[in-house]
Image (spheres, rainbow, N blue to C red):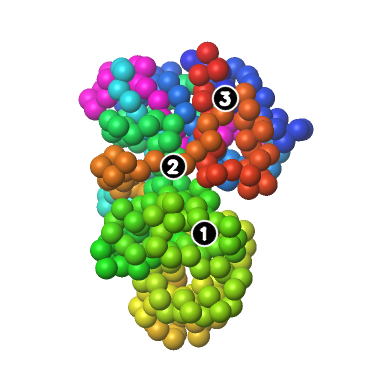
Amino acid sequence: MRTTIGWQADPTTRSLRRTTLQRRDLRPEDIAVRVDYCGVCHSDLHALHQFTGDTDGILVPGHEFTGTVSEAGSAVTGFAPGDPVAVGNIVDSCGTCPMCRAGQENFCRDFPTLTYGGSDRQDGATTLGGYSREYLVREKFAYHLPAGLDPAGAAPLLCAGITVWEPLRALGVGPGSTVAVAGLGGLGHLAVKLAVALGATTSVISRSPDKAGEARSLGADGFVISTDDAQMEAARDRFDVLIDTISAPHDLNPYLRTVAMDGTLSHLGHLGPVTVDTTDLLIGRKKLSSAGSGGRPSTAAMLRFCAEHGITADIELLPSSQVNTALERLGRNDVRYRFVLDLSDLD
């Protein structure tokens, strides 16, 4: 077994504490990654709040990180020590189901192995995430970090970025498209950047009027205040694609009414039950969809696109010793737009 240092959940305090972690021995298809930067996702906060320690084993969050290859297994062909690398929220899958064969490992019928809180497919051990100085991963689920991408700002691309990239590409967003992004947080601000770079006329829908300037600084052409009935009515039937990144439960119907004929609302932010008035789908042949993470080909394509267009997340970089502060502030939505932890203080 290998050892490293990381941040482990304490179920009695609902906080993380620094501790020594055990990692598996390096397998032939593994690379060992020195984790340099790890993004802080809302799902990390949810996992911490739900963690009891009784039946869940050990919880070490973190599933969007960048670093450097420190060692490569004997069968590894695509990476060498010293290579910049990025890892997302999926680290394995069955590899044989139709979804995996189509390059959509995120939809693996046997369920993908998650970067943390998952079950290793060989030894059954609970996967421990990127809030640690070292991570071991199969090389096929690691990605070369393109030159020119700031590694700290690139870390959130591996979760927040790919989550919005896949539906944008699947829905054919490009020049001539009109796109709205509901919510301007970790996912939303990247959705705006990507939609703009794809050539779409892009607007932001937000309940906060003071975010209009932020939206335009990200490249958005329009801004709609969701609590202003007149503005929402003026936006009716306007958008070919609406990327809904709002993390709290909310009524989808007002947003569906802003979608154009044959357009799609992609509901990404809140994973839970929703109620939809079928009439708001019927009038205009509108569609409601969702997406989650991304497959390996799509993730690699997103990283190349972001490098070509200079796209990274807008982040607040903190030493990992401030991880509990970051999580507490994230719970209050006190971040613009993504916290990233610098793991070098674990040396």
Give the amino acid type for the residue marked by disc 1 in the picture.
Ala
Give the amino acid type for the residue marked by disc 2 in the picture.
Ala
Tell me which corner region of the image, top left, top right, bottom left or bottom right, holds residue 142: top left
Residue name at image x 45 percent, y 47 percent: 160
Along the horizontal axis of the image, is 105 left or right of 126? left
Total numbered badges shown on the rendered structure: 3
Q: Nearer the viewer, residue 156 or 106?
A: 156
Residue at the spot of label 3: 319
Foreground label between 3 and 1: 1
Q: Which residues are magenta?
A: 55-80
Residue at the spot of label 1: 212
Relative to 141, residue 222 above or below: below
Q: Residue furthest right?
A: 12
- Residue 210, image x, y percentages: 58, 57
Q: Earlier in the sequence, mark 2 or mark 1?
A: 1
Residue name at image x 25 percent, y 63 percent: 175
Instruction: Please tell me whether residue 176 belongs to the stretch shown in magenta.
Output: no
